[in-house]
Image (cartoon, helix red, strand yellow):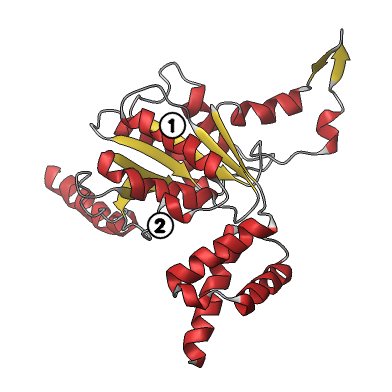
Amino acid sequence: MDEELTRRLLGLLDRAEHWLPAPPPPLDWQRDIAALWQRHALGGNLVPVEVRDALTLDDLLGVERQKQALYANTRAFLQGLPANHALLWGARGSGKSSLVRALLNSLAHEGLRLIQVDRHDLIGLPVLVQQLRDQPQRFVVYCDDLSFECNDDAYKALKSVLDGTLTGPPDNVLLYATSNRRHLLPESLTDNESTRLLDDELHHGDAVEEKISLSDRFGLWLAFHSFNQQTYLDTCAHWVASIGNEDDWNAKAREEALRFATLRGGRSGRAAWQFACQWVGQQRLDS
């Protein structure tokens, strides 16, 4: 009977094995400075990744206040001092995610480690944080382009990890998020219908309070706005010189950069980078 049971169990494991996630590559935080969190039915894995580029803080123009604030917050965290979770919100292409990448390149030698979590994997965030709790390194858990719909329950896991449990996040974990939405959830005119004025004090309704409650758990808010024309042109000149050389930036390049922004419908750091790639590429192709 025992042999029959063993045979059946082994057969079951053989059939189920291909459904199990492949073992992740070995991760060494002394060597690896960035990883992706991949959730699965049995928990999740950390997968090491190569740093995307050599972007530095000096490459980011027009966001000096935001750079200084996030840099100071992160350095305090790395030194074991009090620091805040950070929400970077604002216009698309204005440098939010670029700032986080540049921060990693600048502070990895001081011990910063970055883990990126996709919005759809936030349900597994408590599991990830628990895995990091006893690690000697200090981690920024990062979610890019974060937003939720009204019926999306994934944000509850994020709220809980930020400030909703008895233990809270461990001292060696901070959460940074970028979003185009200040409060991470869509806002409508009807949300304000239950807002009322009592004794000269404004009291928000439950819908507004619920939407504010998530973003309010981030202690550091950094707003990013569309570039004015001069900042956009300065950024174009920086990237043209970086990708090509300083001689590539001239009156013709300036004229084309303005045309490029008009066609794109806005001025941003992303548009400046894209223009520089196009302009330098065409100059080299035609030469």
The secondary structure type at the circle numbered 1 is helix
Residue ID for mark 2: 55
Residue ID for mark 1: 73
Give the side of residue 223 with respect to residue 125, left or right. Answer: right
Amino acid type, mark 1: Asn
The residue at 80%/39% (across/down) is 188
Image location of residue 112, percent across then percent down = 31, 40
Using the rendered image of the protein, determine whether residue 129 is visible from the camera's viewpoint.
Answer: yes
Residue 65 placement: quadrant: top right
Say which of 237 and 132 sits in front: 237
Measure the C-alpha gap from mark 2 to mark 1: 19 Å
Give the side of residue 191 with respect to residue 145, left or right. Answer: right
- Callouts 2 and 1 close, C-beta under 8 Å: no
Amino acid type, mark 2: Leu
Say which of 113 and 270 sits in front: 270
Labelled disc at residue 218: none
Image location of residue 194, percent across then percent down = 85, 23
Say which of 174 and 242 sits in front: 242
How many residues crowd around disc 2 within 10 Å: few (fewer than 14), some, or many (20 or more)? some
Using the rendered image of the protein, determine whether residue 218 is visible from the camera's viewpoint.
Answer: no
The secondary structure type at the circle numbered 2 is loop
